[in-house]
Image (spheres, rainbow, N blue to C red):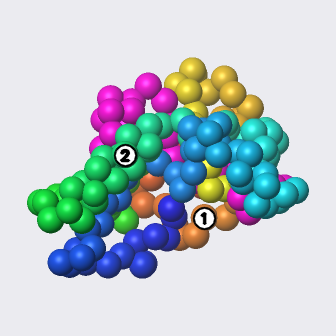
Amino acid sequence: MPGAATARQPDTGSVVHWELAGTAHGDQWAFDLGNATVQNSAGSAAPSPGCAAGSAPFNDGPGHWAMNSALRHLATWARGGARPPSGQPLSTVLRDPATGLATGGVRLPDVTVPTRTLTGSRDTTGSGVFCGLYGARDPWNGDADAWDRTTTATRPTPISPPPRNRCSPGSTRPTPTT
């Protein structure tokens, strides 16, 4: 999640921290499986696939693979087994020039060998707070999607000035380098 680095904790004897590149708090997989529960809990505030109309679809990266692995490691550790391995933190400055994603962190296959841009950020203009938790995916199709043609006048203001090779504000496409 954007800004999560400010709450980082060091690994300890009882805490192991993993950060995943290209994932979101929730994603398409979580939406598909858990939407009924979210609808029951959040009512009309729950996200819908059309939230933030005209923006990219929900992130569909396999973040659940990492969650399954983390739970297996945790169960083993809780039974007296080996402590899970530590994960490399995501960089808050360096970006992968091919995808615009932060470097470091756990790199799932869909990020290591990408066919689309996966991000934890999304344009949430005109939508509820939950919509932003599901990130975004942007197929590499020559910028043929409506969200690829967003003008800078309609993009949200970035939290901080984008460093070189970072995604442009409001976009899931990397900023070209010169």
The residue where tag 1 is placed is 158
Is disc 1 in contact with disc 2, using a CB cutoff of under 8 Å? no
Residue 149 is labelled as none
The correct choice, above or below, for 114 with respect to 50 in the image is above
- Dividing the picture into quadrants, the one containing residue 64 is top left
* Residues rendered magenta in the picture: 106-130
Specify the amino acid type for callout 1: Pro
| Residue sitting nearer the eye, 46 or 107 | 46
Specify the amino acid type for callout 2: Asn
Q: Helix, strand, or loop for circle 2?
A: helix
Category of crowding for the residue at label 2, using alpha-carbon neighbours closer than 10 angstroms: few (below 14), some (14–19), many (at least 20): few
| Residue sitting nearer the eye, 126 or 164 | 126
Residue 149 relative to residue 30: left or right: right
Residue 104 relative to residue 23: left or right: left
Rendered residue at 42%/78% (across/down) = 6
**From the image, which quarter does the C terminus lie in?**
top left
Question: Could you say where residue 23 lies in the image, as x and y percent from the top left?
Answer: 47, 48
Magenta stretch: helix, strand or loop mostly: loop
The correct choice, above or below, for 21 with respect to 7 in the image is above
| Residue sitting nearer the eye, 56 or 131 | 131
Residue 104 relative to residue 124: left or right: left
Rendered residue at 66%/56% (across/down) = 132
Rendered residue at 32%/29% (across/down) = 113
Question: Could you say where residue 49 lies in the image, as x and y percent from the top left?
Answer: 75, 39
Which comes sooner in the sequence, label 1 or label 2?
A: 2
Rendered residue at 47%/37% (across/down) = 61
- Dividing the picture into quadrants, the one containing residue 87 is bottom left
The residue where tag 2 is placed is 68
